Image: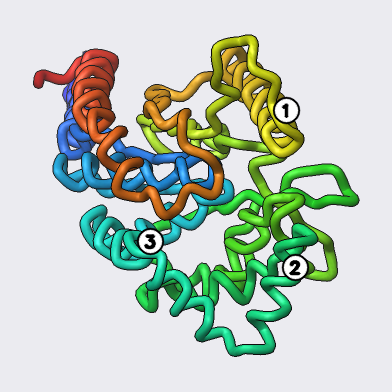
Amino acid sequence: MTGNEAVLVAAKKKKLSDKKRKRKETATERSDPTFAVAFGGGGARGICHINVIEAMDELGIRPSAIAGASIGGIMGAGMAAGMSGKDIRDYTLALMGKKGSVANKLWSLGPASMRHAAFGFRLGQFNLELILDALLPSALPRDFAELGVPLKVIATDYYAQMEVICQDGDLRQALAASAAIPALFMPIRMNDRIMIDGGIFNPVPYEHLLDDADIVIAVDVVGGPEGDGTTMPNRIESLFGASQLMMQSAIGLKLRMRPPHIFLRPPVNRFRVLDFLKAHEVLAESDGIKDDLKRQIDMQIELFHRGRGLDI
């Protein structure tokens, strides 16, 4: 081997060594996994998402992406806007803890709008855009672009018979579309399309985050019919119970195909869709989900490190 050849071989070895060292440094620099969280729909049961947000806050975890359907989209928007779990808890309890406070907020829509809303409720046609505009915190921006974390809000296109992922433009309109529960709220006209509750098509939209983070958390609050198995449900119970069964069927299929890293079902099944005035009870009953989530996060972080051959 000539002197020049020896120099070239040494240079190649050094180049390969430098590449390996850089790869190792990159892995070490990003030793902590990224997280994403999907909040499911379920009406008042979704108040328990606050406990999940608080648990992540306590661990110092800021998600790299968030998705949500219905109430999950609203909770996710608060988190994406930079509100802490405590911020969301305090606001929710101040709003929902007393019936009068909710009424005062609704009356701020104006007498004519309230008469329309009250009449609409009897027909299952509450104007959710007006209601959310009055109830949502001022910390929540008007546009997706103003959020600190990317957010995907799921709505259902009624006539196209498909889910729609909202991630830019008018945030509050998207939240109203995502939470427009049939038989309770008017459908929302968005981009000249008719939208209804995103949970109809995708109750827990975690699959839209699986390529956005190392560890994906999904929270299901759909629930299902409760009883001793012999009591005949009334018409309203039958309507909501049947929709829960259909949504659980969709969730079950997704879990068999491609599950998230962490899947949570807080114990809030006994609460009904409109039990918002029971916010204190929902939070108390689901408080144990915090420890459950923390244990599962620790387990997933350990698996993440092992998979990359990193010391922990």
* Residue type marked 2: Gly
Where is the N terminus found, in terms of image quarters? top left
Distance between mark 2 and mark 1 Cα atoms: 23 Å
User: Against 105, is 79 above or below?
Assistant: above
Q: Where is residue 112 in the image (x, y as percent from the top left)?
A: 68, 88
Q: What is the count of numbered marks?
A: 3
Q: Is residue 72 left or right of residue 173?
A: left
Q: Could you tell whether 106 is left or right of 311 in the image?
A: right
Name the residue: 10% across, 19% down.
311
Lateral position of residue 160 relative to residue 91, left or right? right
Mark 3 vs mark 2, CA separation in Å: 21 Å
Q: Which is nearer the eye, 29 or 50?
A: 50
Q: Mark 2 points at which residue?
A: 120
The residue under the point 38% across, 59% down is 80
User: For residue 114, what is the image quadrant?
Assistant: bottom right
Residue 45 in view here: yes
Residue 149: quarter of image: bottom left
Kind of residue at badge 3: Met
- Closer to viewer: mark 2 or mark 1: 2
Q: Which residue is drawn at 18% across and 24% down?
A: 10
Tell me the element at label 3.
helix
What residue does disc 1 label?
Answer: 242
* Residue occupied by mark 3: 96
In percent of the image, x 45 and y 75: which residue is there?
141
Q: Is mark 2 on a helix, strand or loop?
A: helix
